[in-house]
Image: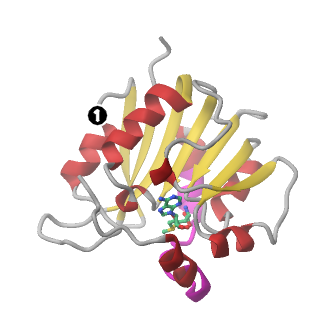
Amino acid sequence: MTSASAPSATTWDAWQDEGRGFQVITDTELERFALHFPLHNGHTAVDVGCGNGHFSRQLHRFGYQVTGLDFSTSALTAARRTPLSGVQYLHHDLTQGDPPGLPAHGIDLVVCRLVLPFLHEPTAWVRRVRDLWLRPGGRMYAVIPVVGEDTTQPGGMTEEQIADVAHGWAHSLRYDLNGTSAALALRAAFT
Ligand SMILES: C[S@@+](CC[C@H](N)C(=O)[O-])C[C@H]1O[C@@H](n2cnc3c(N)ncnc32)[C@H](O)[C@@H]1O
């Protein structure tokens, strides 16, 4: 899938200021995340498209050393209003390649919550994360709004596109979230 009309950083700045495009983290989401992603103090997590950092802060509570990435200056300003040791936020546009300083095959967990439909070629990008970002056995958590086959609205993916994202992992689990989104718990192979 190619998202030719992906919103720009400036558009995201405006949406951030209006409080648009963000989905509340429910207790159910956190319970299911804890169930499928065993807690590991000190493990590294990259929260891609971290927005105002609310999931980055949850990851910190779970014990991860977190890097949140986003290309929206407004979102990062909001995220940095709640500084936490062990959580850093970096300005980075994912369409411009991998973040500088990324340790190849060194990340334990990549989180991609409500971001994939906005990326160009999201399935290819997910495979790059699996093959270059994650350590052997590393994990990915994705939350993706589900849309029907006939919609051209940005921000969601069809079941077929979601299945494509989940394909080719050593372990993959898809479950429903909030009645509107699919959550993917993915694990890369150990070798
Ligand atoms: C719907 S928000 C989700 C924010 C957060 N992950 C959450 O769960 O609330 C999508 C975020 O992805 C960011 N984003 C979209 N395209 C991006 C890109 N190419 N590079 C970096 N960040 C991007 C936006 O700035 C925005 O903060």
Q: Position of residue 120 (x, y in %)?
A: 34, 54
Which quadrant of the figure has residue 54?
bottom right
Amino acid identity at mark 1: His
**Is residue 173 shown above or below 143?**
above
Q: Which span of residues is magenta-colored?
A: 16-32
Q: Against 152, is 161 above or below?
A: above
Q: Quick one: 128 or 158, which is closer to the camera?
A: 128
Residue located farthest toward the front when viewing the structure as drawn = 96
Residue 187 visible? The answer is no
Residue that appears at 39% across and 42% down: 125
Mark 1 neighbour class, 10 Å CA radius: few under 14, some 14 to 19, many 20 or more:
some
Residue identified by numbered label 1:
167
- Which residue is at a point 57% across and 84% down the rendered structure image? 19
Outermost residue on the left side: it is 150
The residue furthest bottom is 18
As drawn, is 32 to the left or to the right of 69? Answer: left
- The spot of residue 103 in percent (x, y) is 65, 29
* Image quadrant where residue 127 sits: top left
Q: Position of residue 45 (x, y in %)?
A: 65, 41
Q: Is residue 125 found inside the magenta-colored segment of the image?
A: no
Above or below for 117 versus 152 = above
Left or right placement of residue 87 versus residue 48 in this view: right
Residue displayed at 54% across by 84% down: 14
